[in-house]
Image (cartoon, coloured by chain):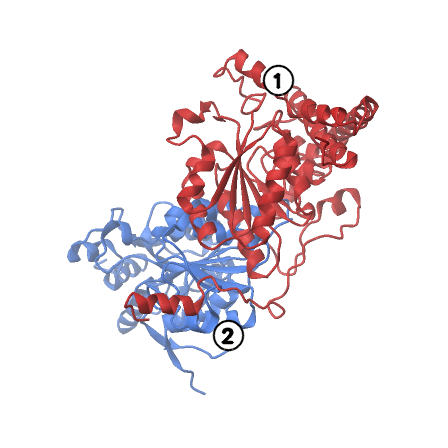
Amino acid sequence: MTMPELMYREALNQALAEEMERDANVFLIGEEVGRYNGAFKVSQGLLDKFGSARIIDAPISELGFTGMSVGAAMVGLRPVVEMMTWNFAILAMDQIVNNAAKLRHMSGGQLRCPIVFRGPGGAGGRLSSQHSQALEANYAHFPGLKVIAPATPADAKGMLKAAIRDENPVIMFEGERLYALKGEVPEGEHVVPLGKADVKREGTDVTIITWSRMYYFCMEAAEQLAKEGISAEVLDLRTLRPLDEEAILASVRKTNRVVIVEEGWALAGVGASVVDIIQSKAFDDLDAPVHRVTGLDVNMSYAANLENATQPDAPKIIDAVKKVLYREGA
Amino acid sequence: MASPYSKEQLLTMYRKMYLIRRFEERAGQQYTLGKIAGFCHLYIGQEAVAVGPNEALRPDDYMLSAYRDHGQPLARGSDAGMVMAELFGRGTGYSKGKGGSMHIFDIEHHFYGGYGIVGGQIPLAAGMAFASRYRNEDRVTLCYFGDAAANQGSFHETFNMASKWKLPVIYICENNRYGMGTAIARTSAVPEIYKRASAYGMRGEPVDGMDCLAMYEAVKDAAAYCRAGKGPVLLEANTYRFRGHSMADPATYRSKQEVEDERKNDPIPKLRDHALKNKLAVDADFEAIDEEVKAQVDAAVKFADESPEPSVEELWRDTIVEEGEQDVRPRERVLGVKVTNWPKYPSGQELKVTWDLEPREQAEQADKKAGLSR
């Protein structure tokens, strides 16, 4: 049986439409989600299907509509809040962090906050410093939130469905540069559980751990490495909070060498926590120090060559793999 | 003119204001004894702002507040012992001692919490009101905030949406004239907060916050306006706190004379005088309430003092909802009281959303007129 090929944005659209049909408590709010059909066309056609009370064009006031949605979730609705990009959500961070993430705790278990905050994250596209950053580490820091970052259209659909059904606040990073990417997506009830990593490529010599858009660079690197006789396993974390320790450790114990690829900055990044898990629980299984490939510790530039130099790519990943394998030239 | 209120109404309001006053005095005392820690913002002087509005609302209307949040849940009917236990950081508190003074939550009485970030609760209230309209319920949401919160972005962003979408929410600005130690006039271009509603095409009115009955009338009227679908209301309750911002504040930024003058405005004797003058109550009624409330507060302190601290395992609970996990009902958990009015939300299948935020036909006509295509 062949599955239909969908773009990443179409997979998300399908997940939204299916969940809204299944549960009238679900509504979508954000800038340009309605009559404009979505800044990145994720919500295309949904206004016509569900009406303006369920597909809500919000004013450009991120803190306001985010907080309003948290309030709606406190009394049982299931909002999906689209951030036009995660860069703008910095304005709404107080509501996500100080309210959504803490409501259940501060109320001693009386309240729950079933809400999804989603939108494009990540760098690229010559957008300079304020529009070009991978911010997932910021949210992965907070107890009370779940943080997900699917790489493929199939995962995008399945994880958004799971996020909408989850009883907790879920932060979903989509790849701004993945929206037009195509892949096979199962039809109908396809739910990918949160908190589960996925071995996207089996290998025996080294584990490359990654998520979201970096996954594609890792696969490209793995293909090239295969030609040189190096067998790389690619582990797509998919969920950054909670981290799937079991899957990380299983792969490390199999390959004994690890490279972590992260689009964001190195200091206090998600990858740093993955290193901590590995060194504290599988130190004896390592044949080399864990190596990280991250975005450079600088703000993003507009110039094409500077932008490219800032980001991880396949050659950098290949170098890192050779380093942990102690191969020459690395 | 005779009082339009019944004896029962007046004594109920008096009893609640008096309970809040005595409760707060004891809380202040327990703070100095080291039984209560952290921030402890007392409500003394502002009792009318919690009690009048509560009597004007239905028990199932939503309410939420800022960090000066002991008074409103007591007005709603929360258990004084469990509120005190929360201040003591005990496992028998409403939030199991995890929230403390600034985060009292009592969902059974539809009190949706106290919040510690200035103005952070303002959008939450609009969202709760949004949910009421989404479900075709006629309940209103009442949200308290302080005068200083009116300068936060959350205030302006929320008022814009609440008014545009005609959400059934009443905002009460408790203007006690100081944002912590800074007089509101020193930081605000327009210190009359109610006037700011006009910027959003919204109803805004000042109310005497030292008069329980004025607060009652204002909220009764505002609630009817909200339930009729006319949109949100901002009330500015001009009130005064007799104590500092928190227990840590000696309030040296204001003169003794100012406080003495304001104390003449005490809302509690004011209500008592109204009842006596209108011959709806006699001195003995108030003496009885005095005895009753003192005993109630004594019992609350005793309950809190004798309650155990939360178990350390509690650290790991109530952060993430595990699959199939039920919500905690504090009075059921602590006092063994069967809770019957826990909110039930309709499942997605039963819910019909009939509301239009932007009615389609109107939008299309407006577009046509403007020469826009869709």
Tell me the number on the disc at residue B3: none
Q: Nearer the viewer, residue A176 or A50?
A: A50
Q: Give the residue type at disc 1.
A: Lys
Residue B213: x %, y % from top left: 65, 33
- Label 1 and label 2: CA atoms lie apart by 68 Å
Image quadrant of residue A32? bottom left
Label 2: how many residues lie within 10 Å, few (<14), some (14-19) or many (20+)? Answer: some
The colour applied to the residues of chain B in this rendering is red
Tag 2 secondary structure: loop
Q: Which chain carries label 2?
A: A
Q: Locate residue A220, reporting x and y percent.
A: 29, 69
- Check residue A190 in the rendering and tell me which mark sits there, or answer none: 2
Residue on which the image places disc 1: B264
User: Which secondary structure, mark 1?
Assistant: loop
B297 horizontally vs A170: left or right: right
- B23 lies left or right of B182: right
Closest to the camera, between mark 1 and mark 2, is 1
Share a chain, discs 1 and 2?
A: no
- The vertical placement of B287 against B218, above or below, is above
Chain with colour blue in the figure: A
Tell me what residue is drawn at x 47 percent, y 16 percent. Answer: B253
